[in-house]
Image: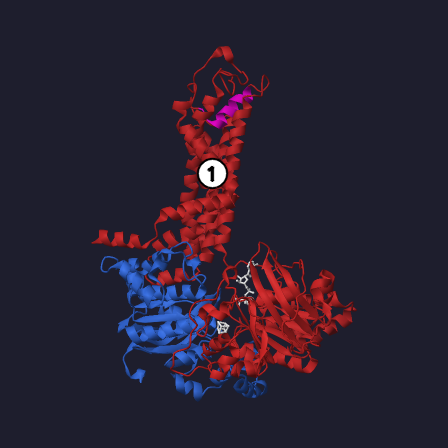
């Protein structure tokens, strides 16, 4: 019974073989050096094992007629002081040299991995004992211990290697504990605990598996150093190996005749250097390979200048000429070609609040960053125009952006606390940004910082100015971010999901603040959100994005009551805040097409209940339909007259 | 109508104190929750109010200082070791973050089988069939079992987490912000799925969320937590239409409604009465 069930369970798992091959191919493409290095190490090992078969001479076979010769046809790598063939000895030495290093590695892993995992996972008393002992062990000079051990165990290389493993393990404990501390907080570890998985099994499966990358990196570095230390000890004559050759021993022998010839040093030294380098390269490759697997969300936004720009023609005629910000046909692509945002077209008038709404990955943030000229490396604008206050920022390039950013346009990012520097006080942040825009005397500067905090309705500026980011709440941090955005007296603020991470009560305060700023100072606001409630609360106009394009925009009341693009209608119907209680929520079948695989026609066609053949016929332009909305749907009027879109 | 049926989980007078160095911090103070059979009890409150602490206390992930928890008539307050692990057959959990809810190095199938293995159920049932069954139940293809988590979207991964929670056929599922990280259309799918599973299998949920509109939609009863104490609890209909506690009122009012006409009428009182957290802005 047990047998059959385990067979069954393994049948549910994928066949590992084809995946491995794919993995190998990929590894070669991404890490050619790592693959070459691994092959090199493998080759050395195999040649070492085959030494008795392939070596031209026996390891100890002397020929006193040819001592200390250079390379010749009989002895490819020459001979040593006793006339032994260097090539053969190198081959015979490979296995013992590597084995010694592997003994050290085994000890290193056997101590470091379990203790690191237990310390990180169990925490508390056990953790402090393990960490304390590791710390002390790291502070003891390793050389002295090694010398003592060698003295006690009459130069036994095995004792030396075991000691080396023990001495190296505290470093590994520290690394593994660090990884474990992070991984143990991940939801699947908690889920496993709840499911009743034994702690031992959690540590042995989930935690070891996740720490594997860092462990392998440490291991490869350690093997390299074990080889070097072994060579150094042998060179100093501290290891006794009897007649068996090792690479380190060969260096030791060569060094004794260095006044006669330096040649015998070369092959042994070279092989050690190459092997150590190979282990280092394998370590690097593992680090690179595992670091992009481990951080799926590790994107970072950094500044980047726009590249080629081709102005595009307007496709529809709404009176947006006087609008403060006009973005037309904005196109943003990854440098290797995939287009993320295709046709972002919208405008914001002076004193207006415009909301951009859409689901995750539809290109809202990329559009905002493209508009601001703040795209991260790897992305660039490759079409369209961004006109702010009559100036085409994209065609004017970096200086135009520099002049406008902060001064004309302020930016508030989603991660309120993350965008503050933990080592600076609130005052430090404000001063820096204010001074970037205007030169003020210290007294004026102080006054301005207070003024900005009052503007974002912080009641006791004097106290708050002294606080560090870790001392303030998320809501407070977002107020500070808004104050920072206001420092350059901008006319427009672009806020990317400014309240998504906040509690609803705090969210409503922040929204209220933005609304009041807009009313009192005629500020324009472009707010990005995925929450229809926020749109309903704030916006004068709504812009709906889907799969990298703007699909609909219009006056906020119209968009909510009479959406003119089926996706808008479907997304509104999925919102539980307005759907009737006790009824099933409307869902949208399928999923948003990924950037590389968007259909040519209507991008919503695959999920649209009203799709026809015509919908897939080439790109659809934005156009105005009654009652004044802009939409991409070619069937908008028809569907509107059937009443299937209205709510 | 649901609260007349028998309770599957009762948490009585739960107090949880954490030690922070020398100081004690009371995360939960005398909290009571009762989950009837085949019903959903919502737990709302802002961050730091103790929602997740209650979930963890019930799941045995944090020690309870005082109080008593009963699952299916059995006192589980101080169970640990093997007997606590055995509860994985009756109670399971789904967590918030779809990015960390599955081990990225395991196939979906391996993640799904884990609870079965832990409960020694591999020999009792046809594992493949069960995996296919739970995947189908959450609206996914059975061949998803052989794929890696990164091949799935956030919503799909969240559905796989639900499938994993269902695989031992538990009576109670604790959902800690289980839909909070999802997009609207995916959230709708998962909410519908939870409702369907409840109808088909008589599941009970403890549904933790900060989103009032979601709670309103899915929960039969609601408990409002504020700084570790219960402000108010009762049938959803009553709490959301006639809240007795000012904090509940503020919470309801703060959640924006997706209708500009309605929402703008609700705005005025918001600006008149400052929300209660104004005083708690600085932590
Ligand atoms: N640096 C990048 N390199 C490659 N692709 C990227 C990069 N940044 C974003 N993308 C892709 O661009 C698309 C749009 O991403 P964007 O961040 O603009 O979405 P969004 O609408 O802001 O979503 P969310 O609501 O999750 O914030 C996504 O498919 C995303 O994966
Ligand atoms: S164009 Fe066609 S497929 Fe696209 S939204 Fe309109 S009806 Fe649907
Ligand atoms: Mg975004």
Horizontally, residue A260 falls left or right of residue A238, namely: right
Few, some or many residues within 10 Å of mark 1 (<14, 14–19, 20+): some
Q: Secondary structure at mark 1?
A: helix
Q: Is residue A625 visible?
A: yes
Q: Is residue A133 visible?
A: no
Q: Colour of chain B?
A: blue
Give coordinates of residue A271: x percent, y percent.
Answer: 51, 29
Residue placed under numbered mark 1 in the picture = A38
State whether residue A641 is above or below residue A324: below
Question: Number of numbered discs present?
Answer: 1
Q: Choose between A624 and A446: the one closer to the eye.
A: A624
Give coordinates of residue A268: x percent, y percent.
Answer: 52, 26
Give coordinates of residue A605: x percent, y percent.
Answer: 47, 69
Q: Colour of chain A?
A: red
- Magenta span: chief secondary structure: helix
Res. B172 image quadrant: bottom left
Q: Choose between A242 and B204: the one closer to the eye.
A: B204
Question: Residues in magenta?
Answer: A245-256
Identify the residue shown where x is 46% and y is 86%: B245
Give coordinates of residue A98: x percent, y percent.
Answer: 44, 33
Res. A309 image quadrant: bottom right
Disc 1 residue: CB within 8 Å of ligand 1: no
State whether residue A392 is above or below residue B104: below
Is residue A223 one of those drawn in magenta? Answer: no
Identify the residue shown where x is 49% and y is 17%: A75
Quadrant including the N terminus of chain A: bottom left
Identify the residue shown where x is 44% and y is 47%: A23
Horizontally, residue B136 falls left or right of residue A232, namely: left
Q: Choose between A167 and A569: the one closer to the eye.
A: A569
Chain of the residue displaying label 1: A
């Amino acid at each position: 019974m047990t047998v059959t069930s385990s067979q069954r369970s393994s049948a549910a798992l994928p066949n590992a073989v084809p995946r491995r091959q794919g993995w190998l191919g990929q590894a070669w493409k991404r890490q050619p050096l790592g693959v070459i290095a691994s092959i090199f190490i493998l080759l050395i090992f195999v040649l070492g094992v085959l030494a008795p078969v392939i070596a031209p001479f026996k390891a100890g076979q002397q020929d006193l007629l040819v001592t200390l010769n250079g390379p010749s046809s009989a002895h490819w790598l020459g001979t040593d002081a006793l006339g032994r063939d260097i090539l053969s000895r190198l081959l015979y030495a490979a296995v013992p040299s590597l084995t010694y290093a592997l003994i050290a590695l085994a000890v290193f892993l056997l101590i470091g991995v379990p203790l690191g995992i237990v310390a990180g996972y169990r925490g508390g008393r056990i953790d402090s004992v393990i960490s304390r002992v590791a710390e002390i062990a790291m502070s003891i000079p390793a050389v002295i211990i090694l010398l003592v051990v060698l003295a006690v165990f009459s130069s036994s290389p095995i004792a030396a290697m075991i000691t080396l493993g023990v001495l190296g393990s505290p470093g590994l404990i520290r690394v593994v504990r660090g990884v474990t501390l992070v991984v143990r907080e991940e939801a699947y570890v908690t889920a496993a605990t709840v499911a009743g998985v034994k702690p031992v099994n959690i540590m042995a499966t989930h935690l070891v598996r996740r720490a594997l990358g860092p462990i392998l990196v440490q291991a490869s570095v350690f093997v390299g150093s074990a080889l070097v230390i072994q060579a150094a000890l042998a060179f100093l004559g501290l290891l006794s190996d009897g007649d068996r050759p090792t690479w380190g021993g060969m260096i030791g022998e060569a060094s004794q005749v260095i006044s006669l010839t330096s040649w015998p040093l070369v092959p042994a030294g070279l092989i050690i250097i190459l092997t150590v380098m190979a282990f280092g390269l394998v370590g690097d490759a593992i680090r690179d390979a595992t670091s992009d697997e481990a951080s799926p969300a590790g994107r970072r936004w950094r500044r980047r200048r726009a590249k080629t720009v081709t102005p595009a023609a307007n496709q529809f005629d709404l009176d947006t000429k006087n609008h403060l910000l006009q973005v037309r046909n904005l196109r943003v692509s990854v440098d290797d070609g995939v287009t993320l945002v295709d046709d972002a077209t919208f405008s914001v008038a002076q004193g207006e609040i415009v909301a951009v709404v859409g689901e995750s990955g539809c290109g809202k943030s990329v559009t905002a960053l493209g508009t601001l000229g703040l795209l991260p490396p790897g992305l660039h604008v490759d079409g369209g125009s961004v006109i702010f206050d009559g100036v085409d920022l994209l065609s004017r390039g970096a200086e135009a952006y520099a002049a406008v950013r902060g001064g004309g346009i302020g930016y508030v990012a989603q991660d309120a606390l993350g965008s503050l520097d933990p080592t600076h006080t609130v005052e430090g942040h404000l001063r820096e940004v204010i001074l970037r825009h205007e030169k003020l005397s210290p007294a004026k500067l102080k006054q301005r910082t207070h003024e900005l905090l009052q503007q974002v309705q912080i009641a006791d500026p004097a106290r708050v100015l002294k606080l560090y980011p870790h001392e303030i709440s998320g809501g407070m941090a977002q107020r500070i971010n808004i104050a920072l955005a206001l420092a350059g007296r901008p006319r427009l603020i672009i806020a990317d999901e400014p309240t998504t991470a906040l509690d609803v009560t705090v969210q409503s305060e922040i929204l209220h603040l933005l609304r009041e700023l807009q009313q009192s100072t005629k500020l324009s606001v472009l707010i990005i959100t995925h929450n229809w409630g926020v749109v309903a609360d704030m916006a004068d106009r709504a812009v709906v994005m889907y799969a990298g394009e703007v699909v609909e925009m219009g006056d906020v009341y119209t968009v909510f009551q009479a959406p003119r693009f089926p996706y808008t209608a479907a997304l509104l119907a999925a919102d539980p805040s307005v759907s009737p209680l006790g009824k099933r929520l409307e869902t949208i079948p399928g999923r948003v097409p990924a950037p590389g695989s968007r259909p040519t026609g209507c991008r919503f066609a695959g999920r649209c209940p009203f799709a026809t053949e015509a919908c897939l016929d080439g790109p659809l332009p934005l156009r105005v339909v009654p009652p004044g909305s802009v939409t991409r749907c070619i069937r908008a009027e028809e569907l509107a007259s059937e009443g299937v879109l209205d709510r | 109508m649901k609260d007349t049926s028998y309770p599957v989980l009762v948490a009585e007078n739960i107090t949880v104190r954490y030690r922070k160095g020398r100081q004690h911090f009371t995360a939960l103070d005398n909290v009571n929750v009762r989950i009837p059979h085949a019903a959903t009890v919502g737990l709302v409150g802002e961050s730091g109010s103790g929602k997740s602490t209650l979930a963890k206390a019930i799941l045995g992930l944090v020690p309870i200082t005082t109080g008593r928890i009963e699952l299916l008539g059995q006192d589980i307050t101080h169970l640990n070791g093997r007997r606590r692990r055995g509860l994985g057959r009756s109670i399971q959990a789904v967590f918030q973050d779809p990015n960390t809810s599955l081990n990225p190095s395991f196939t979906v199938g391996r993640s799904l089988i884990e609870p079965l293995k832990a409960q020694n159920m591999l020999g009792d049932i046809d594992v493949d069939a069960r995996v296919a069954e739970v995947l189908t139940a959450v609206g996914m293809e059975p061949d998803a079992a052989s794929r890696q988590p990164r091949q799935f979207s956030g919503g799909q991964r969240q559905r796989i987490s639900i499938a994993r929670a269902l695989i031992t056929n538990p009576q109670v599922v604790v959902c800690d912000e289980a839909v909070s990280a999802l997009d609207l259309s995916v959230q709708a799918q998962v909410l519908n799925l939870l409702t369907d599973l409840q109808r088909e299998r008589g599941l009970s949920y403890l549904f933790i969320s900060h989103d009032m509109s979601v709670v309103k939609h899915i929960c039969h009863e609601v408990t409002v937590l504020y700084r570790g104490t219960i402000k108010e609890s009762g049938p959803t209909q009553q709490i959301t239409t006639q809240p007795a506690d000012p904090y509940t009122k503020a919470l309801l009012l703060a959640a924006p409604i997706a209708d500009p006409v309605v929402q703008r009428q609700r705005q005025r009182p918001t600006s008149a009465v400052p929300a209660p957290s104004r005083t708690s802005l600085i932590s």
